[in-house]
């Protein structure tokens, strides 16, 4: 059966299904939410937001229309404060506005070579499940407990996001699956804002959006999340425990390989 071709437009200012929202669409979404949080009963007016930033209404209106502008750090800080952005959203704003994140990141290319010390650290987390992913969430390392809890990591092409969003078993094992799905989709948005030309990420999003439910959730809201560090959730794993298991994910970024994620489930 032929698959539907999903086109991912990384520059679009519209938030249509199958497209990554650009800065303009995010600004509109954030301004609407700011109005809600300020109990205005409507989006924060463009003129008021522009005044808070110290710029003209026309300047801000052009931003929401997709105008390209180089924003200095002072203006970005005022804009983020006025829109009530959280840390991940601020980083996304920097990524779009400056072409870089406020967090320093020097890294080696994504590959699975030279990971012996990290694999040793994974093994030392026993009996806690632990795993290592690259920037596209491909599993590049795991310990024995992780394989016992989640046998899918043993597959040569194991990918956390594909498993969590597409495989039926994930929808059974992740209690309140829609909440997890929204989180995974928000992580893809952040990753593509940081690496818009990453073919692995684009391919991942195309695969995910072939699923109707994921496609609906993608279009439902414009959330961005960098990672799931400290995220508490519940798992239904009959082969591990007859009861629902409460866990927390701890996400560590190796200093020498900052495109990798070292995750421990506690």
Image (cartoon, rainbow, N blue to C red):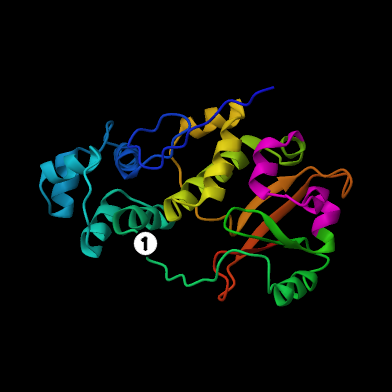
Q: Say left or right for 56 vs 20.
A: left
**Residue 220 vertical position relative to residue 59 in the rendered view, above or below:** above
Return the x and y of residue 236 as percentages of the image width and height.
Answer: 79, 42
Q: Which residue of the protein is positioned furthest toward the front in this rendering?
A: 2
Q: Quadrant of the C terminus?
A: bottom right
Which residue is under mark 1? 100
At mark 1, the secondary structure is loop
The magenta-colored residue range is 146-168
Instruction: Classify 10 Å Cα crowding around label 1: few (below 14), some (14-19), many (20 and above).
Output: some
Q: Position of residue 192 (x, y in %)?
A: 47, 49
Dominant SS in magenta: helix
Q: What residue is rendered at 35% in x and 33% in y? A: 14
Q: From the image, which quarter does the N terminus lie in?
A: top right
Specify the quadrant of the image occupied by residue 208.
top right
The answer to if 167 sits in the magenta stretch is: yes
Q: Residue furthest top?
A: 1
45 or 29: nearer the viewer = 29
Q: Is residue 255 above or below residue 230?
A: below
* Residue 265 shows in this picture: no
Q: Is 254 within the magenta? A: no
Left or right: residue 65 versus residue 86 is left
**Residue at the image point whose x is 63% and y is 26% from the top:** 3
Q: Is residue 104 visible?
A: yes
Residue name at image x 39 percent, y 33 percent:
15
- Say which of 98 and 9 sits in front: 9
Left-right relation of 123 to 42: right
């Amino acid at each position: 059966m032929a698959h539907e071709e999903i086109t991912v437009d990384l520059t679009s200012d519209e938030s249509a299904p199958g497209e990554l929202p650009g800065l303009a669409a995010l600004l509109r979404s954030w301004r609407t939410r700011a109005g809600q949080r300020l109990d205005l009963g409507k989006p924060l007016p463009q003129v008021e937001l522009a005044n808070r930033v110290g710029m003209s209404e026309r300047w801000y209106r052009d931003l929401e229309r997709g105008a390209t502008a180089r924003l200095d750090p002072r203006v970005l800080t005022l804009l983020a404060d006025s829109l009530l952005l959280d840390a991940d959203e601020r980083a996304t704003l920097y990524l779009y506005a400056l072409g870089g994140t406020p967090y320093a990141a020097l890294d080696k290319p994504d590959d699975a070579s030279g990971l012996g010390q990290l694999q040793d650290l994974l093994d030392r987390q026993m009996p806690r499940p632990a795993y290592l992913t690259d920037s596209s969430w491909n599993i590049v390392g795991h310990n024995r407990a992780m394989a016992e809890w989640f046998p899918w990591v043993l597959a040569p092409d194991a990918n956390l996001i594909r498993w969590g969003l597409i495989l039926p078993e994930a929808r059974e094992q992740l209690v309140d699956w829609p909440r997890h799905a929204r989180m995974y989709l928000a992580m893809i948005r952040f990753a593509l804002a940081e690496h818009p030309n990453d073919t692995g990420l684009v391919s991942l999003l195309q695969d995910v959006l072939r699923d109707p439910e994921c496609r609906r959730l993608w279009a439902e809201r414009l959330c961005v999340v960098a990672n799931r560090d400290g995220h508490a959730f519940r798992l239904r794993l009959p082969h591990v425990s007859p009861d629902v298991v409460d866990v927390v994910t701890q996400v560590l970024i190796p200093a020498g390989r900052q495109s990798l994620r070292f995750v421990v489930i506690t």
